[in-house]
Image (cartoon, rainbow, N blue to C red):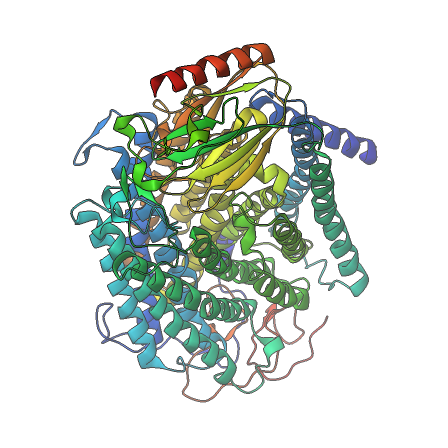
Amino acid sequence: MARALSALLIAIIAATAYFFSRTWLPALATSSGGAIDRQLTLNFILLGVVFCATQIALGLFVWKYRERADPQVVTNTAQPDARVELTWLTIAAALFLGLNIAGAAMQSRVPQVSAEEKPVTVEVTGVQFRWYFRQPGPDGRFGQTKPKLVDASEGNPLGIDRSDPASADDVVSAELVVPAGKPIEVRLHAQDVVHSFFVPALRIKQDAVPGQDTLVHLPSAEPGTYDIACAQLCGMGHYQMNAKLKVVPEAEYRAWLEQQSAAQVARR
Amino acid sequence: MGTANNSAPRGDHPPNAAKSLPRWMGHESSFSFSAHHRVIARQYFLLSLAAVLIGIVLSLLMRLHIVWPELRIPFFGQIKPEQYLAYMTMHGTLMVFFVLSVAPQNAFGNLVLPEQIGARAMAFPRLNMFSFWTTLLAFMVMVSALFVAGGGSMSGWTQYPPLSAITSAGSGQGRGTDLWIVSIAIFCVASLMSAVNFITTVLRGRVEGMSLMRMPLTVWSWFVTAMLTLLSFSVLLAAALLLFSDRHWGTSFYLPAGLVVNGAAVAGHSGGSPLLWQHLFWFFGHPEVYIAILPGMGVTSHMLSTFSRKPVYGYRGMVYSLLAIGVLGFMVWGHHMFVAGISPYAVLAFSTLTMVIAVPSSVKVINWLGTLRGGRIRFSVPLLFSVGFVSLFITGGLSGPILAQPAVDMYLHDTYFVVAHFHMIMGMAAVFAIFAATYFWFPLLFPDRMMNETLGRAHFWLTFIGAYATFMPMHFLGLAGNPRQYSQIAGSAKYLQKLLPVHMFITISAFVLAAAQFIFIYNLMHSAARGKFSGANPWEATTLEWEIDHGQKLTVHHDPYVFGPREDSRRDYTMQSEPPYTYKS
């Protein structure tokens, strides 16, 4: 009976944990992000059971062993023997290191960019308090940038050196437009302070650190518009530093890129 | 006293109990330059009380601004985003440094530690006095930052450069940030002096018979905390000086070449790395969270044993797990930097070590439960707060392993999930231990007085419910991807707009939580002047701080937590300094 009751209780707790972890997460834009969600749910279920077991035990013990009016003696002054202590240590170590191993194994299975498939490369730059996205255009090469050329009012917020032929067709946009179903390689920069490139729908977050290039691989995503936010305190406008990720069918993406880069070349 | 029937004397007193405690503070006020450890304890206590009150007010202003950014608040007007960030930085700094590092260690450590080991005084009383006044100076410099031109620093208590290193990066980044750095440097010096004092006192000041394994767990936790303080604050001091140097003397420890801030290129820097600060800061910062919580663990073990009327379950396990947590605490700083752009191998190592630290923490929880099991629990206010500590420690502790997994942390990092995690464990749990300590050692803090039980119970329940109502929903905000340190929801990304009702609920809960503290403040002021008299050993505890000072040296004959019926009296406890007696096991 007691066993059946505890089994039922654990089932209820697990279901609740599952429900809570899933209802609050934003909708996924990629199939490969599902592994992270499953790992999170596994955490919630296992740790949810531990949480309830320990909190219930705490409440029960405090209530059951409260001092009563009738004389009563301390019933259990035994000290733990080495075997009991070892058992607890093993259970705790197995639980926490097991989660650790499961998480690491899951992460190593998240599909990386395969060698034969050439990813779309985008440069993402964080500036107080907006994101800039640069794509290399048809030539596939980014032009040079120089800090002293940075001038947002002149339309050159990234300081692109227009005398570099590779920069002629570079496209700078305020929205991140990428093709659906293709892996994206992001080269992450920051111009002034540390920012963090956060795409909730892809379960991706990576700091943009000044003075260093960080590579991030975005998994291939389904068409749609998703939010991009800044997750590292960067100053007064931190809360409003957001942008859109537009995932469009590949043909549409090609057309967009061509049109943008032609406009860029014409502007010179 | 525990329950109503506790107020009647429970059997005879130990043979050496005199009628009243000495009036140790008759001529020493709280505001004098005193080298007496109890006066200094009271000064530290009042300092942290001032800091926590300012911290609470700032947090309420922040909560109001998040949900109603247009609101005009009496005396403050409409809060601007940069003010929000200045309040947030000040809230975090005051709470972490001037409350959680001061009250558990310096206030209660000074009050109780020398007496629990029978030392009567700290090893270096004048250095102790100097530590306090230096801490007070640091506090005044810190708070003054709110009133200078440009306002307080807005780069958070973690002060990541380049935001904290470049004056033009924001309005509080000029004089406000200078004052922050100077204040923290002074605070580091004060903490180092105090840590040396604690370590020396424990190692050299114990009376005969007080072997290390007979020390109360409170003493063990203050001892380990002092060692963490010594090793970690020295690193923060160096890191802060380097930051100051980058700001004013043209060095480039944290600043790379090619920065463009506010549209203007920053000249004269090259070769530095913002990540160096993060490494140095978190090498301090992670041990710091244990500096805040370890004394709470010691206090909780002490209370649970005293009020269950039985020995601590697994005393040795408690000591070893404290030491293990202290040592491992220095090896996990990288888990604050999983998404900062460090090597994936380092990430794996830090993640594994972080999981390992969950094991000694589990030992603590199991042993607390084991201490309660089979006892005769007296429902005193310190017991309630200690049980609350265990509950909050479990709740806040279990979200730690979730954040320790890099893949999951990639999503949850820097969201409200983290805010929930550290407020539950390092904020609320530590504060519950401070409350338990205040109610328990009140007769030492304000001579011979007890705090009011009824008010204490009301305070406990409102605080317990308020803490859960405020910080539990933050887990859901984190799961929904709400980044921290956003000054408002209305002007931020679209996917966050539906979370506004949750934020409103949290704001209301925070006001309930804050309001409950008025009960505590009233109880404190009232009881300090007019509280019930305590008598010699009001809680029937076993440790030496309740022993009457007859001027002779004490000798310790017993382990710290000897509870259980005696054949020679109706008492159920044996004080550490009593003559040898064979008690039933």
Q: Is residue A91 visible?
A: yes
In the image, farthest residue toward the bottom: B552
Where residue B575 sits in the image (x, y, percent)? 56, 75
> Dividing the image into 4 quarters, which one contains the C terminus of chain A?
top left
Where residue A34 sits in the image (x, y, percent)? 67, 26
> Dividing the image into 4 quarters, which one contains the N terminus of chain A?
top right
* Nearer to me, A46 or B388: A46
A77 versus A205 height, above or below? below
Q: Is residue B275 left or right of residue B321?
A: left
* Nearer to me, B24 or B345: B345
What is the quadrant of residue B108 in the picture? Answer: bottom left
Q: Is residue B469 left or right of residue B191?
A: right
Where residue B567 sits in the image (x, y, percent)? 67, 74
Residue at (62, 76) in percent of width and height? B213
Residue at (71, 39) in percent of width and height? A108
* Nearer to me, B245 or B336: B245
B327 versus B497 height, above or below? below
Q: Is residue A70 visible?
A: no
Residue at (42, 68) in percent of width and height? B234
Number of numbered labels in the structure image? 0
Residue at (26, 47) in percent of width and height? B173
